[in-house]
Structures are given as structure tokens and as C-alpha cells.
Image (tube, coloured by chain):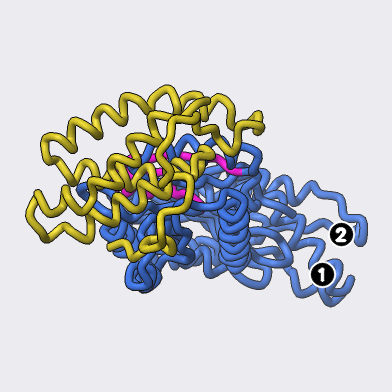
Chain colours: A blue, B yellow
Amino acid sequence: MTQSSIHESETRPLVLVIDDSIDVHRLLQARLRSEPLELVQATSGEAGLEMARDRTPAIVLLDLDMPEMDGFEVLRALKDDPRTLHLPVIVLSGLQSPHDKVTAFDLGAVDYVTKPFDLTELKVRVRSALRVHQLLDMLAKRAQVDGLTGLYNRAHFDQRWPEAIATAKRHGRPLSIAMLDVDHFKSINDTYGHPAGDAVLQEVAEIVQNSSRASDIACRYGGEEFVIVMPDTSPEEAQVLCDRIRTTLEQTNWLKHPERTVTCCLGVAGCDGGEGPDSDEWLSKADQALYRAKTTGRNRVETTRLDGPQLAQTA
Amino acid sequence: MPGPHEDQNEPHNEPGNQSGDEPLKSEFGHDPEMLDLIELFVGELSERVSKLQEAWESGELEYVRMEAHRLKGAAPGYGFSPIGQVAGRLEHALTEASDTALTARVEAASEDFERLVNLCGRVAA
């Protein structure tokens, strides 16, 4: 299955040009028009830094000799900021001394093109830098994706879950998490074989993904377990969503084993705003709710409200 | 700071060093993608040169150096390589003489400045 948020971007990569010369901006605009990229322009180091932070371009073309904040300072600031640290920077400069080139590379530039530049050569260098950027970006994204289901993997969850809690607490917003476990999954594998088990996991992932909103973070936690992080969602709303997942799975027809339905349990833990335990304890509450669902008959949703009375289970 | 250009100390034998009044045409005059841009550059150049001359006469040599730096980088992109070459020499002369007195800087750069103004006055779209 696929997930829109983890597709490689189909939009044109953004190339930020930081140069105080309006001529350079005009020439690049004209000469790179035919390239599959979008140019954004800044005419000072300060403006360029701000755009690099706000727009997260794919690459930066940076002039060195600019009044006030020069390119070396910009490069240093880009590399000092975690938001822009990994941005590939091609220096585009009239400074031609080896010392300037060495300094630029030492500061983290990936390439150095001297002015006046040959536009054909520049195009090729920009293409090459974009190719490398896209490959690294794709590898970084794939490292966060589960190969079987296409959902985000555990590593991604481990990174995003504490961030989601921090955001909810900072803004006093609701937040819920659900853990899902497929009922009797081992018996499906044992009875129908691992390909049938894999098909179940893929179908569960698709149901989870289709039931989630764009802001939710659906991950395969491991084995037949999944987690769904639901920002801006109260435990009651999360319970409704989880019950929809549960019933959809229950009603699914299976090509490989039409005689056997597949069900799941979900454990939800959430609260309304700004409160809640740390990430481990919060997840543990969801796991305990899942355990209750398992031990009270399976094919159920159990919900724990972390800032109030328990909610009724659904089945 | 800028190092010497390849032709920095060579005898002045490129177009930028020839005095004359024949029009200087863009090397990209045949390129439809560039026609509008060349026209824009040529149209704005006289004002840029006026400002350059004002700065030169009032001793604002850092402005002159920066503008020469920009022309060095940009003029070849519009197909006016000779302007880029002379602007590069002017920038270099002003940079090399940056620690000297104003009169010494002016003296070191005056030949290239005059050449640049002459060339810019000859551009034609």
C-alpha cells in the first residue's frame, strides 16, 4: 500500500538563489526556465537565511561577495541551524582564489562555481546537486517506512510520538493514541501460510490508512501490531475512529480464506488538552487498554481517558 | 579576496581594451530566450554607468568595486564578455589597492574605469 505523506515529492524542487545582483537573478530565471525546478530569490544574506528556514529549498545557490552579511556568514549560519544544516549549498561567486574556495568547502558547500559562469555548466551542476539531494531524501524517507505495509515504521513512530505529545502540551490540544493488534494472527499464519498473513497485515494497514486523517500518524509498530497517533483528537473521537477500523476489518472478505474472518483489538489512550504523562507511560496506557480488549473477548476497542473517567468499551 | 584573473597582467589585446566607437553587440543576440533580457540590461546600463561615474567622482570606491563585481559576474551572461573582463580588472585593481590612499586607488584603477565606461557606452541591443 502507499501513503500520500511518504511519497517522493512530485512537486518541482525549490532552488533558492541568494545574490545581491539582480542581473544574476534574471539570468538564472531565464536560463533555468526549462529545468524542472522552481526558483526563489533573495537579494541579501539576511533575506536568504530567512527564506532557507521558511521554505526549506532543495538546494541553495549562494553568492559570497555581498554587502552587509556576506556569503561566508550565510553559509556559517545555515550550517549552525538544525533546520538548514543539511541543505546543499552551491557557491556561485566571483571570488576565485583557492583560499576562498577552500573556506567555502570547509564551511560545508557542496560545489563552487565561479562567475562569470557558463550557464550550461551551471545547469548540469544544479541537476547533479538535485539528483544527489533527491536520492538522499528518498533514502531518508525509505528508512522510515515499513517495507511490507508501506506505513511508517517503528523508528518513525519513536521520533514522532514524543514530538506529538510536546506539541499537544504546548498548545493545550487534545491528543490520542491507539494500539492495534490482529486477533489470533499466529493461527492465520499457521493455518493459511505466511503469504496469507502478510496479506492480512497489508489489508489492516490499508484500512488504518484509509480511516486516518492526513494529520494522523499511522505506523506498523512490529509484528501484527500497529499504532495510530491522532493529534487534535479526544479519546471519544479516537474511539469512534478505532471502532470504524475494527468493523471494517471484521467485514472484510478474504480471497485466501473466505471462510475465516479476521478481527482486531484496539486500545486507546488520550486526553483533551495540555495534560497527560510522558510518551512511554502514555503508550503503556494504550497497551494496557489493548490488553483489556484482548482479555475481555477480542474484536473490541478499549479506551482510557488520561484526564478523567474511563470510557465505555465498544464491541 | 579575488585572485588575479588569467588575463590580469597580460597585454591588453581583448576587445575591452580597444578604444573605439563601434557598437558592442551581445554574443547572444541570436538567442530568442535572451532578447528581452539583453534589451533590459542595455536599457538600464546608461543609468548604472551614470551612478558609477558619480561614485567615482565622489570617491565612493567601494560602490564602484561592488558594481564592477556585479558587472563582472553578470555582463557575460548577457553576452557582453568584454564588459565582464574589464569590470573584473577594475574590481581587481580596486581590491589590490584597498589599503592605499584614495588617490593611489584612483590612479591604479583609472585606466580600467575609463575603459569600462567606454565599453558600456557602446553596447547595443
Q: Vertically, is B118 above or below A36?
A: above
Amino acid type assigned to the residue bearing label 1 in the image: Ile
Which chain is disc 2 placed on? Answer: A
Question: A175 and A312: which one is in front?
Answer: A175
Residue at the spot x=35%, y=46% of the render?
A: B87
Cα gap from disc 1 to disc 2, whole angstroms = 9 Å
Which residue was labeled with disc 1? Answer: A188
Question: A63 and A136: which one is in front?
Answer: A63
Question: A128 and A240: which one is in front?
Answer: A128
Few, some or many residues within 10 Å of mark 2 (<14, 14–19, 20+): few
Query: Do the residues under discs 1 and 2 have CB atoms within 8 angstroms?
Result: yes
Q: In the rendered image, is residue A71 in sight? A: yes
Amino acid type assigned to the residue bearing label 2 in the image: Arg
Which residue was labeled with disc 2? Answer: A260
Q: Secondary structure at mark 2?
A: loop
Q: Which residues are magenta?
A: A37-58
Q: Secondary structure at mark 1?
A: helix
On whether residue A50 falls in the magenta region, the answer is: yes
Residue A36 rendering spot, x and y as whole percentages: 64, 43
User: Which residue is most to the left?
Assistant: B101
On whether residue B110 falls in the magenta region, the answer is: no
Q: In the rendered image, is residue A282 in sight? A: no
Q: Quadrant of the N terminus of chain A?
A: bottom right
Residue B101 rendering spot, x and y as whole percentages: 7, 55
Residue A185 sits in quarter: bottom right
User: Which residue is most to the bottom?
Assistant: A190
